[in-house]
Image (cartoon, grey):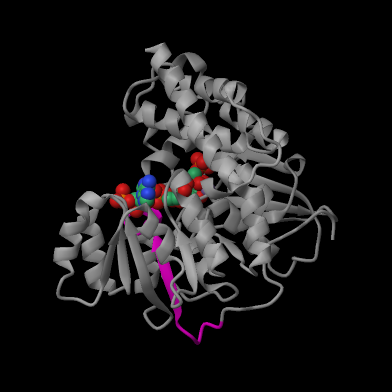
Amino acid sequence: MGEEKRLFPKTVFYFMSEKKHVAILGSTGSIGTQTLEVIKSHPDKFEVEVLTAQNNADLLIQQALEFRPNCVVIVNELHYQKVKDALLHTEIKVYAGEKALAQVVEMDTIDVVLTALVGYSGLLPTIKAVQAGKQIALANKETLVVAGELITQLARENGVNIYPVDSEHSAIFQCLVGEFHNPIEKLILTASGGPFRGKTREFLKYVTKEQALKHPNWDMGAKITIDSASLMNKGLEVIEAKWLFGVSQEKIEVIVHPQSIIHSLIQFEDGSIKAQLGLPDMRIPIQFALTYPERLKADFPRFDFAKYPSLTFEQPDVDTFRNLNLAFQAIKQGGNAPCILNAANEVAVAAFLRDEIGFLEMSDLIEETLQKSCFIEHPNLEEYIETDKMSRIITEQLIKSKV
Ligand SMILES: NC(=O)C1=CN([C@@H]2O[C@H](COP(=O)(O)OP(=O)(O)OC[C@H]3O[C@@H](n4cnc5c(N)ncnc54)[C@H](OP(=O)(O)O)[C@@H]3O)[C@@H](O)[C@H]2O)C=CC1
Ligand SMILES: CC(=O)[C@@H](O)[C@H](O)COP(=O)(O)O
Ligand SMILES: [Mn+2]
């Protein structure tokens, strides 16, 4: 069975004749709203239990009135009264704050928690959900980047499966169906290359956030779109793949595929390669994560081979886009290094989005933060939390010293 410690099911636990009760963390975002589209098209299959937002009270209220969850959480407490007033004449419970976000996932009525929060904020609610034995549909890749070892160990201890929502990991998962017992020789993650594919470092020095936010193929939240432009998204996905599929980083390759039609590939030990293809549409992986092992009929637009006469591939330019190698180095180092990388990246992306730093400076900050942070080989949860906090301080100080 090789080194694999896969989290995927030995047994089938979902029977789609029963309604699945879903908590969506981050329901107002790109993944959250698409999850609700999937749920809306299968009212006989799903029930919404929990919806959450950080600031977008208006959309949260609208979603709550339409999907009638058991409860909602507005994380920013300043918006609590507005949400409470709007839902006053309903039976929907309204909570506010980070603690509430981590607590609601424990509700008895929830079967599966879909984590569509952005960044490190997904870590604690995911841990609570796993400890409560909830199945996880994971979009929030940063959770596995920060603490993949801890999360996967907790998942095993609690009999929890982590179903990937991220398109590349869903592709790998889909290719693994029927192959769970077969060792993986290599995982090949595809990358679009982002809006700056083929550009030089000279060009990248002056790019704006508006340019960086124009992803060629996917319409996503701001943070992941910047990560895609800098290739950090692929770096985070390498780390995510390592933990999801129990494959060491030496067996993970990244190939640039600008059309984003092949979502990723597995090479098995007989040399055979399996791939999953489709138009770039997150509703497919979202639905599969919620319905595995079944595939529900859906009317998502179909891929037409005639419209794509050439699917192309090229090596990533890791000299120009340094983040990919920084991520490989961090996962090779192990311990809290990926947690440091993630914290520095989140601070750097936020600073880039505030026009405080240039595009290339993001990699410099991440590299310097990794050098300056204290390495811990086997961190516990408190040490991950402390690492995240300290790394953010270091990156913020580095930014201040540069401006
Ligand atoms: N979008 C995509 O196609 C893909 C996304 N992913 C991953 O999925 C996750 C979500 O991405 P995406 O949907 O694009 O992100 P968005 O920014 O579109 O949405 C994020 C959601 O999380 C909420 N949120 C943001 N910050 C916090 C916080 N600190 N605490 C609590 N809630 C918070 C937001 O609330 P509010 O609306 O109120 O701000 C919103 O509901 C990310 O980890 C991303 O990497 C993975 C693959 C594809
Ligand atoms: C849709 C999805 O899964 C994103 O993570 C996407 O893959 C981003 O595209 P890049 O390949 O440009 O990072
Ligand atoms: Mn992805």
Q: Quadrant of the N terminus?
A: bottom right
The location of residue 286, given as percent across then percent down, is: 48, 63
Q: Nearer the viewer, residue 337 or 114?
A: 337
Query: Which region is colored magenta?
Result: 15-31
Q: Is residue 23 magenta?
A: yes
Image mark count: 0
Instruction: Give the residue at the far front of this rendering.
Output: 382
User: Residue at the spot x=65%, y=39% of the render?
Assistant: 254
The location of residue 403, given as percent across then percent down, is: 37, 12
The location of residue 386, given as percent across then percent down, is: 53, 37
Rendered view: 87 above or below 12: above
Rendered view: 302 above or below 211: below
User: Residue at the spot x=53%, y=19% of the render?
Assistant: 364
The location of residue 20, given as percent across then percent down, is: 46, 78
On the picture, is 188 further left or further right than 206? right
Q: Is residue 199 magenta?
A: no
Rendered view: 147 above or below 245: above
User: Residue at the spot x=49%, y=24% of the render?
Assistant: 394
**Residue 29 visible, this orientation:** no
Residue 325 lies in quadrant: top right
**Residue 114 visible, this orientation:** yes
Q: Nearer the viewer, residue 353 or 343?
A: 343
On the picture, is 64 further left or further right than 278? left
User: Residue at the spot x=61%, y=54% of the render?
Assistant: 151
Q: Nearer the viewer, residue 157 or 353?
A: 157
